[in-house]
Image: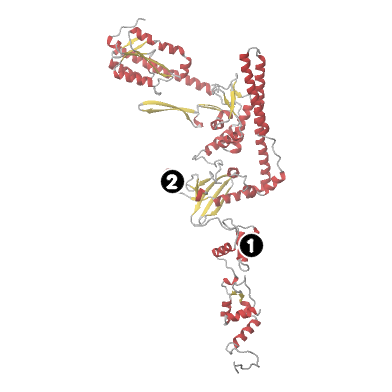
Amino acid sequence: MKPAELPRSVLDRRAIVYVRQSSMTQVEQNLESQRRQYELVDVARCYGFVDVAVIDEDLGRSASGTTSRPGFDSLVAQLCQGTIGAVFCLEASRLARNGHDWHHLLELCGLVGARVIDVEGAYDPSHPNDRLLLGLKGTMSEFELTLLRRRLVDGARQKAQRGELRLPVPTGYRWEHGAEPVLDPDRRVQDAIRRVFRLFERLGSARQVHRYLCDRDILFPRPADGKHQDATRWAIPGYRNIISVLRNPFYAGAYAYGKSEVRTTVVQGRARKSYGHDRPMDQWTVLLQEHHEGYVDWTTFERNQHKLATNTFCRKAGGAKSGRGGRALLSGLLRCRRCGRMLQVAYAGRGQLLVRYACRTGQAMHGLAKCISFGGIRPDERVARLLFDAVQPMAIEAALMADKQVQQMHDEQRRALELQVEQARYETLLAQRRYESVDPDNRLVAAELEERWNHALKRLQQSEAQLEQRLPDAPAVDSQALTDLAEDLERAWHAPSTDMRTRQRLVRALIEEIVVDVDDSTREVVLLIHWKGGEHSEHRVRKPGTGEHRRRAPEEADAVIRQMAGRWSDEHIAASLNRLGFKTGQDNTWTAMRVGAYRRKKQIRGYTSAHKDGRCLTMQEAAQSVGVSSYAIRKLIRSKILPARQVMKDAPWQILAIDLARPDVQAALTAHRSGRNRPCRSHRDDQTLRIPGT
């Protein structure tokens, strides 16, 4: 077709060739469309344009109006400047597939006198007839896009409702020639997927499963090219690999379609689409259970989803969160009885070593008043004690089951390494066969195959060494030692090898949740424990008073001090406490000074007469009670007439009131009173007066 003649005022300006394709797949595969659009440059020169520019920044971008197009924006900006004489496009759909962009472009071209030219001819938007024709083309292009999209979506939905739409399958599955997917025939891949579900059932946390696999260098399968399942590579798993296995219903034998949705928002007057927004399960377009063979059943999948939602930080899903370590035993288990929110863990004290539970979500998020807060040491100890009482009847069976689980974990690790060695051995044999099948004289090929064979041999040696060195045979467990440990659960609980995460997992194995409140009238923490199986029990824990701390001497040491204080010196008491193995509240040995300080703090008297009950008297009190001097009482004690005792030398004498009423003591006191006023003279009658110098 011969190009139409254009005015010189149009030809003196620049011609723009707009090149666009809707997707990157079209850019990579539909090369003929690109060639035809770039050939419009020659068409522009045939029209008589000298200055021809190409705008191809929008390759791979849709013209539906929901995607930003920098090339189209540049075209509009140049039109507004009046420097463009014509816009060349293959068809109207290349410029726009929505009415807003299309009519805006036509309006600008009409204002500046620019032409719109396609393979069918040139149009002047300032003329009504041409503008009408271009408007129809734009409307048809927009309607065509909607119609095509609807046909494709409806067809895919109908096929998905029958479970026949071939969606990308996750690792561990393959689409075969049949109508449904099947398990990957590689047993190593199957074992890796099942191991994730077994570990999650045991550990209760996706993060713990990921750490378990990484700490033991257990590899996980991934697609080699990221798109197709034909080739698999093995690497250390990432967290997203573990969470994708646990959350994908495909592994539960379910066919799901429409799990996510597209959302459209208006940004600066233009529609913008965002993809990948998850929808609730009850809003999925298609969900066909028991569609194919699964790694787990649907009940297990739902239980795993509930556990994952519970473990998510700050979610309100019921149930206890998984044990994550730290210093708080009941972290993620406590729920406030007043507001229903989960309590959070806070740390206080010097070095942030003291654990406190506080309900502060309402205050932080909504500005409400604080609900409750209390120290965590006493509630943790009470729950641990209740746990001992609950587990003790079945402690031996639980210990044997734990030993069985340890053996199973060891067997799983060994099997993973054995499968790795088996695959490395196969790859080595394959590389050997390829090397032996090539002509030895063709050194260009033989040298490369020989190098691959050597690399395969090295991987085989590394896998075999890892199997022998890092995972020897499981050590035999002494059944008697295990039984003895089960009978003393408290010793096993406080053992250095038992970390806090293990304790938290033990608590969560028996306790579903704990509803907690604080009774301000009695200063008690009220724990309503919801046990597994539906049982409930309420317990109260006293809150410590102001200034009360836990660094105190044990009750046994206090009993010894109270028993010995009236008869033994502080030095003897300290020696006895040290022989018994008791320590002070500061974990020090006892000395006489520390025993004395403890007695004074606890108001423990060092001798019996200190208790002013009239039963035991000091020397001065005894003298006042009988009306004599202290010297007379001391004289009776020294002459062994009046019984008395001392805790130590120079200590106060302790005299029983009943001993003062004895007949011999009363007689001695009477004799002392009768001879009190007589002059002091000697009993010798032969005394003579001797005067010096006589």
Rendered position, 382 above or below 573 = above
Q: Residues within 10 Å of mark 2 (few under 14, many from 20)?
A: few
Q: Position of residue 218 (x, y in %)?
A: 61, 32
Quarter of the view holding residue 202: top right
Q: Position of residue 305 (x, y in %)?
A: 55, 35
Quarter of the view holding residue 104: top left
Q: Nearer the viewer, residue 81 or 163?
A: 81
Q: Nearer the viewer, residue 97 or 39?
A: 39
Q: Look at mark 2 in the image and give the residue it sits on.
A: 363
Residue visible at 45% across and 49% down in the picture: 370
Q: Nearer the viewer, residue 573 or 192?
A: 573
Q: Which mark is residue 529?
A: none
Hey, what amino acid is under mark 2?
Answer: Gln
Rendered position, 471 above or below 638 = above
Residue visible at 63% across and 60% down in the picture: 577
Q: Look at mark 1 in the image and give the residue it sits on.
A: 575
**Horizontal side, residue 51 vs residue 385: left or right:** left
Hey, what amino acid is under mark 1?
Answer: Ala
Rendered position, 343 above or below 3 = below
Give the farthest residue toward the top: 2
